[in-house]
Amino acid sequence: MAKNLLQDVVRKKPGFTPAKRSGVDPGKFKLLPQRPKYTLWSVAFISLLFLFFALTFLFARATIIIEPQVENISLQTTFQAVKGGDSPSLSFDIVRSSFEEAKSVPASGEEDIQEPARGLIILYNNAGSSPQILSRDTRLLGSNGKIYKTKARAIIPGRSAGGALGSVEAEIYASEPGEEYNSPPLDFEIMGFKGTPKYSQIYGRGKGEILGGRNGRYKVVSVAERQAVEAELESTLSVKLSQKTRAEIPAGFILFDGAGFIQISKKETVVPENGENISIKIAGVFTGVLLNEEELSKKIAEASWAEYDGREIYIPDIRNLDFELRSGDLKSNSDIKNIDFNLSGEIKIVSKVDFVKLRREVLSQKKKDFPQILVRYPGASGATVRLRPFWKRSFPTEPEDVEIILSAYNK
């Protein structure tokens, strides 16, 4: 009966009173009003719209791919540089590195040998601003009481305007052969200045040990074998000196291939007191020209690019240029002040774009306005903009959401 009653309620039109047929109190039955279907769709649409905007702000990203202005150059130019010079001069510095290599070989005989000990010293000038010239074979009194001599003519620079002592490196040798002249580093007085103020103002200090002094009968190796071992050691020494020097070059500086030389500072043979093997040793010093990469790049642009306007640039393959020293003898003058050198080769001069400034300028800007922003950056020949999500039409509001990269030659 209850089932039939409910069916009647469903079938009957509004206004039907069940009590008229069943005797049931009409106050106990109320029909719920029907909710229109479009209300549910409206709620769903609003939810999706909210999610859409939430995702838009949460995942908003921008990528700007810059096409830099690139100038192809065939370089064949001579440059001048001044040691420690200030702008607008191109400056250079001298880099030096020393290394030693040794090999033990069996003795092949004995010989009477007379050789003086040899070594390196630093000569200092505190006598004034004028340079001091020391002739070859200038006599030096070592702090061990023995006499040594300079191997070559030396020019000691005067004291600088800032008060720094003038100094120069020089080779010395013992005045007589013998092992008694072999010594740890010594201090030296210049005997020719004795009795004058220069005696205490111009002096020398040892740079490493003084070795190689012999006078007597010693075990030896044949001349041919010695030459072969020394050639092998020199080859190994050259590689290690070059590696050691380049590893010590500070960031932002260039040491071109061909911009330096290796000088063998000493060769010696050491016979151990016990055993038959002889140790052949050689020591070398690398001296090279060090150039500032940014400074040199601008000088190259000024010399080879007619339209260069002083903008920030870089040359990705600058280290591949051929370097030739045209004037300035590094071998004979360790205190050289000026050099001329030639650079040749094929290069690309790439204009820089200030990424930090560009990123700041595009924040919250519309994509359609980007071309007007880019014209303020002459280093860019063009650009591609990618916004994410794809429906975005303006740049993000936070700098970290904007990525800028170069389409080529990215450093």
Image (tube, rainbow, N blue to C red):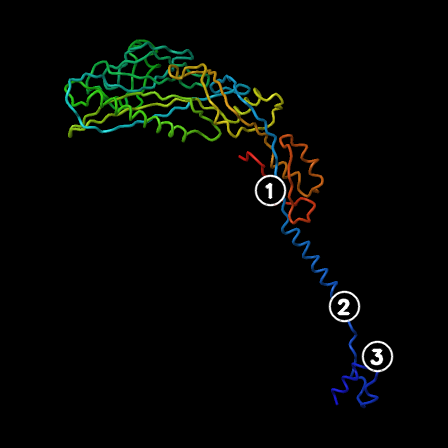
Q: Amino acid at mark 2?
A: Lys
The first of marks 2 and 3 along the sequence is 3
Q: Residue 231, percent across and down?
A: 29, 23
Give the labeled residue for mark 3: 14
As drawn, 6 above or below 86 = below
The first of marks 2 and 1 along the sequence is 2
Q: Residue 305, percent across and down?
A: 59, 22
Q: Residue 86, percent across and down?
A: 52, 20
Dot 1 alpha-carbon crowd within 10 angstroms: few under 14, some 14 to 19, many 20 or more: some
State the SS at label 1.
Answer: strand
Q: Residue 278, percent across and down?
A: 20, 26
In the image, taking residue 317 as reference, residue 48 lies left or right, namely right
Q: Amino acid at mark 3?
A: Pro
**Mark in front: 2 vs 1:** 2
The first of marks 1 and 3 along the sequence is 3
Q: Residue at x 66, y 54 (%)?
A: 54
Question: Tags 2 and 3 in contact by the CB under 8 Å rule?
Answer: no
Dot 3 alpha-carbon crowd within 10 angstroms: few under 14, some 14 to 19, many 20 or more: few
Q: Residue at x 77, y 86 (%)?
A: 5
Q: CA distance from mark 2 to mark 3?
A: 20 Å
- In the picture as drawn, the residue positioned furthest to the right comes out as 15
Q: Amino acid at mark 1?
A: Glu
State the SS at label 3.
Answer: loop
Q: CA distance from mark 2 to mark 1?
A: 46 Å
- The disc placed on residue 403 is 1
- The disc placed on residue 37 is 2
Quarter of the image holding residue 180? Answer: top left
As drawn, 139 above or below 23 = above
The N terminus - image quarter:
bottom right
Question: Tags 2 and 1 in contact by the CB under 8 Å rule?
Answer: no
Q: Residue at x 23, y 13 (%)?
A: 175
